[in-house]
Image (cartoon, rainbow, N blue to C red):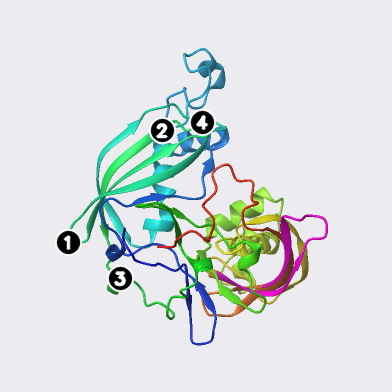
Amino acid sequence: MPTLHHSAYARDPDGLLHERFGLPFEALEAGQIFEHRPGITFSQQENVDEALSTFNAAQIHTDEAYAARTAWQGPLMVSTWTLQRLIGMTWKTFGLGRRRIEILHEVRMSTPVFAGDTLCARTEVLAVTDDARVRLRTEACNQRGDTVAWADYTVRMWRASELPERPGPAVDEARFASHVAAGPHTWVETYGLCFEDLRAGETFVHALRRTVEAHEIAAIARRALEWSPQHHDLAWCEALGESGCAIPQAWLVGLATALTTLTLGRVSANLGWTEVRFLRDARAGDSLQARSTIRELRSSRSRAHEGIAHVHTTLMNGQAQPVLDFQRALLVYRRGFEPAPRSAPDHTAAPI
């Protein structure tokens, strides 16, 4: 069994905990199996959206009346959308180190996928070569345990020395392991900290930055009935001397909250926000990143299997300027009590 320990967090000189994801080339060897988390449920709306956006004219995907008269008795999910999700679900293990897919040797759709199906993925490392190429086999299973699709493909990887500089040394604690062992050569990706693993006073710099483009701002505003011209009328904004359309502020609250979920992903419920302060506008092209400090932890009086965390989160722009901050209270599952159908093993299992 490989002895490599890969932590999902690094500590910088100021004591801040930086989320990390993805394994470099040197961490991989033939025979490893990675169980990816989380899974994802497919919907008919995204089936239609994918068909329309790619000019897919096959009515088996979009015409429910037609599809009901076929042997499938309903719309089939677009197979290339299944392929996209198949590869996408591997990001927490391979997304950072993967330069590019060089070849898809074979892709098979072995069981039909319908709206409402929930897929989880697992990947076996088939071969590793000295030139930083890795051959992988990723398969997706539905909620019934049926393999619905698999892909055999070769990727070119980044070596550890080629990746952007780490903010500090990895934190070698079991609660921060990026994967936990589920067998001699099998590891399951972790997905957030349990209530027992949170510590008051710790500050997390969340790993995923989000660059917001102009076309996204207009779409966000339209969907929310936020039809103020500052969100979609570039000429109006330029007449006021602004560099671009402003991102709707309520959406920013959601973005800042969502960006915390690599650490705070075992949430049972969000109990609400207080003191939400908007410190400056965020506009098209801004790259936004969140950081959170655990302020207070206490047991839930009514839910024995959950605890309450009070968290302060700040959303920063690319110039390290605060855009907004807020206090938030959330219910977090205690270890072993999250009712996920296929949850990762306990954090007390052996980390890699």
Q: Secondary structure at mark 4?
A: loop
At 44% from the left and 30% from the top, the residue drawn is 146
x and y percentages locating residue 121 in the rendered image: 43, 44
In the orientation shown, which residue stands out farthest toward the left? 130
Q: Secondary structure at mark 1?
A: loop
Residue that label 2 marks: 147
In the orientation shown, which residue stands out farthest toward the bottom? 13
Closer mark to the observer between disc 4 and disc 3: 4
Q: Secondary structure at mark 2?
A: strand
Quadrant (top left/top right/bottom left/bottom right) for the N terminus: bottom left
Residue that label 1 marks: 131
Q: Please name the amino acid that badge 4 sits on.
A: Arg
Label disc, if present, on residue 144 of the rendered structure? 4
At 53% from the left and 87% from the top, the residue drawn is 14
Q: Nearer the viewer, residue 230 or 73?
A: 73
Within 10 Å of disc 1 (Cα), the crowding (few <14, some 14-19, many 20+) is: few
Q: Is residue 119 magenta?
A: no
Q: CA distance from mark 3 to mark 2?
A: 33 Å
* CB under 8 Å between discs 3 and 2: no
Residue that label 3 marks: 160
Q: Specify the segment rendered in magenta.
A: 289-312
Q: CA distance from mark 1 to mark 2?
A: 32 Å
- The main secondary structure of the magenta stretch is strand
- 1 or 3: tag closer to the N-terminus: 1
